[in-house]
Image (cartoon, helix red, strand yellow):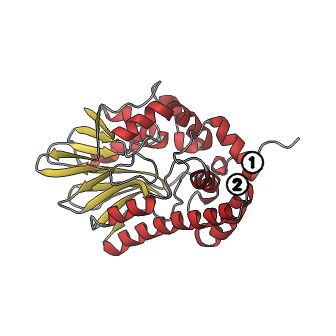
């Protein structure tokens, strides 16, 4: 009997080079060659961190770099969405407030435990020193609906829900005075969007809503920080194209009466030439196509991924 085929991500063992760069007067980006990014806002009297890294041990590297440029207290942690790889490092920062949208809070209640087990199983390297994660879930201490404004001294920081896309709870962090945006996983750059919990029908409009802010700098969920209108537009366009191409292929397959397996193989083959060089393409595609197929057939809202469902899906499509 053949051993089950492992997730593509389990072969991803190479450590990534970290870059810590300043994008505008108060904004910094912690990026790592396609691994999950963290955004940092250094205000007049406090620091805000957007997305925490996957474990407290990994968050220590973010904190070390923050401390190279400021000794101001880290008062706020923002969860752009509920995925474990974004939130489980939160305890390391000792923040006064952990902020998230009400929709993200609801998703943690509904599927946080299942998602945690699922993600750790899929992506072992991204959960370095996973034993440093405290038991239980990372719970927001404050939630908001659609918009919240923080003042870090005279610096205005807006937390905005501009529509569903990567998840239903997606939040962006926007510095209007500097036109700098932290998008979470609504935007990726040279990295494949993970869309296993996505809303394919809503995501393009949400990206248009981001573009309407006219950002001059953008920190995507994965990939290099984007500077200047041209680079920002390229990042938005690339993400939008990928989502549209997956949807078009899946819709065509569903309309032709094909099953998930056939739709997956066709969609993978049609997108590989254009997007196959993007980080985690092989890993994301089975999850993305499965979710899109669900949305186009019988599941308006994403089904919960569990470690068991992950394995069954992978075996079905890649076994």
> Which residue is farthest top?
135
Label 2 residue SS = helix
Q: Quadrant of residue 263?
A: bottom right
Q: CA distance from mark 2 to mark 1?
A: 9 Å
> Toward the viewer: 36 or 215?
215
Label 1 residue SS = helix
Q: Residues within 10 Å of mark 1 (few under 14, many from 20)?
A: few
> Toward the viewer: 170 or 191?
170
- Position of residue 286 measured from the top left corner of the image (x, y, whole percent): 65, 53
- Up-down relation of residue 171 to residue 254 (above or below): above
**Eye-nearest disc, 2 or 1:** 2
- Up-down relation of residue 36 to residue 116 (above or below): below
In percent of the image, x 32 and y 50: which residue is there? 161
In percent of the image, x 48 and y 42: which residue is there? 85
Residue picked out by circle 2? 260
- Name the mark on residue 214: none
Q: Residues within 10 Å of mark 2 (few under 14, many from 20)?
A: many
Q: Visible in this render: residue 6?
A: no
In percent of the image, x 39 and y 49: which residue is there? 170
- Position of residue 183 in the picture relative to residue 123 (left or right): left
Pointers 2 and 1 in contact (CB under 8 A)? yes
Residue picked out by circle 1? 316
- Position of residue 67 measured from the top left corner of the image (x, y, whole percent): 28, 44
In percent of the image, x 63 and y 62: which residue is there? 250
Q: Quadrant of the N terminus?
A: top right
- Position of residue 32 measured from the top left corner of the image (x, y, whole percent): 46, 55
- Position of residue 131 in the picture relative to residue 59 (left or right): right
């Amino acid at each position: 009997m053949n051993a089950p085929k492992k997730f593509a991500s389990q072969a991803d063992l190479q450590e990534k080079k970290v870059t810590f760069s300043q994008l505008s007067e108060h904004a910094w980006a912690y990026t790592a060659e396609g691994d999950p990014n963290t955004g940092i806002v250094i205000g007049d009297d406090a620091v805000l961190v957007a997305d925490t890294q996957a474990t407290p041990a990994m968050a220590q590297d973010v904190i070390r770099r923050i401390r190279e440029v400021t000794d101001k207290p880290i008062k706020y942690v923002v969860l752009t969405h509920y995925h474990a790889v974004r939130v489980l490092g939160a305890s390391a920062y000792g923040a006064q407030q952990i902020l998230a949208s009400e929709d993200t809070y609801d998703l943690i209640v509904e599927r946080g435990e299942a998602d945690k087990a699922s993600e750790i199983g899929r992506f072992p390297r991204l959960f370095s020193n996973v034993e440093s994660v405290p038991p239980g879930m990372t719970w927001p201490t404050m939630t908001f609906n659609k918009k919240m404004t923080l003042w870090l001294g005279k610096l205005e920081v807006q937390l905005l829900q501009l529509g569903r896309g990567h998840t239903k709870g997606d939040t962006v962090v926007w510095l209007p005075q500097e036109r700098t945006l932290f998008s979470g996983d609504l935007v990726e750059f040279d990295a494949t969007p993970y869309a296993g919990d996505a809303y394919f029908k809503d995501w393009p409009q949400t990206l248009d809503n981001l573009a309407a802010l006219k950002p001059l700098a953008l920190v995507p969920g994965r990939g290099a920080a984007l500077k200047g209108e041209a680079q920002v537009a390229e990042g938005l366009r690339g993400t939008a194209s990928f989502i549209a191409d997956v949807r078009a292929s899946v819709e065509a397959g569903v309309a032709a009466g094909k099953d998930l397996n056939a739709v997956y193989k066709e969609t993978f083959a049609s997108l590989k030439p254009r997007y196959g060089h993007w980080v985690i393409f092989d890993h994301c595609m089975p999850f993305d196509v499965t979710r899109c197929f669900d949305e186009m057939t019988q599941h308006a809202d994403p089904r919960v991924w569990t470690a068991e469902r992950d394995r069954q899906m992978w075996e079905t499509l890649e076994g």
